[in-house]
Image: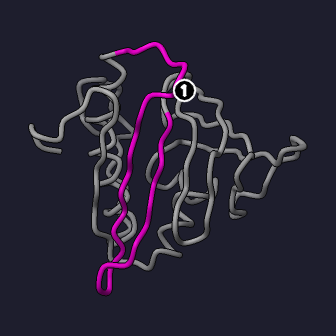
Amino acid sequence: MTEKNFSSEEFSHGILLNASPEEVFTYLSTGTGISKWFIGSAKYYYGDKSIRLGNETAGKGDSFLWTWLNKDLELKGHVTGSEKGKSFGFTFGPSFLVDINLTESGKRSKLTLTQKYQDSAVKNEFAYINCCVCWVFFLTNLKSVIENNIDLRETEADNELLVNR
């Protein structure tokens, strides 16, 4: 993001990862994968409300329940898109839509995350800025987990000022 392309409606972040788009996709689209770098625990449900296994890919129209790591915070939402090795999208709270696109970049994958307001959303500047900043950490953590098998999230100290909490 630069000053010229800054928008208060949506933002995008990108990162290069030493993994194939298909491998990265499993870190985005499965309960087991997304819990390694972003959420404390994740459950995905088929449209009929039966639960998917932890290593099973969530599909468009599925719902989810995410619980944050070491926080009393849960989020329910829906998967808005899921194309193996290419893209994954979801609602993020009542206000936002997140779309993640994967492309090959030489021997690496380029992940581009875009978050924007849903059409009916009430604008919340704090939530928007908080998400913009937090996604930088979580995408960096995804890279750390994929490339070094190291989760940078803080699990011992209970201090909201820590950037990795």
**Residue 105 vertical placement versus 82 (above, below):** below
Question: Helix or strand or loop: what does disc 1 sit on?
Answer: loop
Instruction: Give, as a three-letter code, the residue at label 1.
Output: Gly
The residue at the point 74 percent across, 46 percent down is: 61
Q: Foreground: 151 or 65?
A: 65
Q: Look at the image and tell me in which quarter the C terminus lies.
A: top left
Q: Which residues are magenta?
A: 97-124
Give left or right: position of 74 versus 60: left
- Residue 83 placement (x, y as % from top left): 61, 65
The residue at the point 41 percent across, 34 percent down is: 116
- Residue 70 placement (x, y as % from top left): 48, 32
**Residue 46 vertical placement versus 78 (above, below):** below
The residue at the point 35 percent across, 45 percent down is: 153
**Residue 73 vertical placement versus 47 (above, below):** above
Q: Foreground: 2 or 149?
A: 2
Read off the residue under disc 1.
93
What scheme was used to colour the molecule?
one colour
Q: Is residue 69 magenta?
A: no
**Residue 77 vertical placement versus 50 (above, below):** above
- Residue 28 placement (x, y as % from top left): 53, 57
